[in-house]
Amino acid sequence: MKINLITPAGGNLHNGNRATAERWAGFLRKLGHEVVLEETWSGEEPALMLMLHARRSHPSIKRYATAYPERPLIVALTGTDLYRDIHSDETAKESLELATALIVLQDMGLNELEPRHRSKARVIYQSAEPVHLQQSDNEHFDVCVIGHLRAEKDPFRAALAARLLPPSSRIRVTHAGRPYGEEFEREARLHAAVPRYRWVGELSRREARRLLARSRLLAQTSIMEGGANAVSEALASGVPVVAARIPGNVGMLGEDYPGYYEPGDEKALAQLLYRAETAGAFYETLKARCEARRHLVLPEREKAALDALVKETIQTDIEREGYNRAMDEKTRIRLTKYSTKAG
């Protein structure tokens, strides 16, 4: 079956949306489908359309729904969709209406949808292959931040927390991510003057995975997140996580996970980092709790979930077409009877 997969993230970008689109394309091809991966819809007619981002992909969503109103249209909702745009942006709201089915990337995402949209939403956790850990440097307790420098990521919270650590701490924070504008780049360079904090710019996915492999902790500091790929990578690899308590992280790590701090509170983050460094029992608890969530990010689980959704959506489409044909036939019979009587 031919599937068009649309993501507004171009092939030259190393971001979460692009990684998700490429991974899904790979799974769907393994399942036997022909997949066309595009930034915007080219106009080709697929059997099924899958689009990431309700707001940014809205022009393609609207054009496709207008051209093929009876065809399946799946829209995957990103963090900015769920936690901002579908509540305030009319184009994102229209995308929800036009979609045949919706995808959210963790359980808490369902809470953002109205009941009529929630009924057509499915949860698909993003998967990751594990990395081989290389945590051999005893001089430092390495913490990584993997995320681009933009407002939704609260990118410098870990840098601010690093300034508050006591002199005895061995914590070193390494941040990988591309700055979204000159202001973010300037601020990153200012923070990099602090010995505990290193900003290494944008890394390829392979390089980011190597950074994760060398780290004792991942710090997930976003204030808006649909379901971070970096958290999936950490869960798959056995690297514990400390994270801002936001719905997107709670949906990934669990409501009662002990490694949360309140968003925007660098003092609380610093205390959490230092506790993980110095309290072995607490660090092992974080590891065990992350290990307990690892099953959510297994590649076979994500592939099976995609397969089930595609089959469900296509079956619904077949049933709808069958119903429409039946109704058309009943209408034809009624009209024939009426014409005969009239004659």
Image: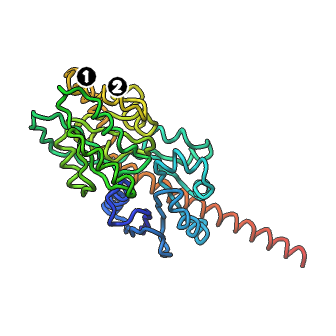
* Callout 1 amino acid: Phe
Quarter of the figure with residue 15: bottom left
Residue 135's place in the image compared with 23, above or below, is above
- The residue lying furthest to the right in this view is 342
Residue at image mark 2: 258
* Residue at point 40%, 31% (across, down): 265
Name the secondary structure under disc 2.
loop
* Residue at point 21%, 21% (across, down): 279
Q: Residue 135 or 315: which is nearer the viewer?
A: 135
**Quadrant that contains the N terminus:** bottom left
Question: Residue 246, position in %: x, y?
Answer: 44, 36
Residue 198, disc: none
Please state if 136 lies on the left or on the right of 298 as rendered: left
Q: Residue 207 or 73: which is nearer the viewer?
A: 207
Mark 1–mark 2 Cα distance, whole angstroms, equals 9 Å
Residue 142's place in the image compared with 199, above or below, is above
Total marks shown come to: 2
Residue at image mark 1: 282
User: Which class describes the residues within 10 Å of circle 2: few (<14), some (14-19), or many (20+)?
Assistant: some
- The residue lying furthest to the bottom in this view is 343
- N-term-proximal mark, 1 vs 2: 2
Quarter of the figure with residue 335: bottom right
Question: Residue 297, position in %: x, y?
Answer: 32, 43
User: Which class describes the residues within 10 Å of circle 1: few (<14), some (14-19), or many (20+)?
Assistant: some
* Residue at point 26%, 34% (across, down): 240
Please state if 55 lies on the left or on the right of 170 as rendered: right
Q: Residue 331 or 64: which is nearer the viewer?
A: 64
**Quadrant that contains the C terminus:** bottom right
Q: Do the residues labelled 1 and 2 touch (CB within 8 Å)?
A: yes
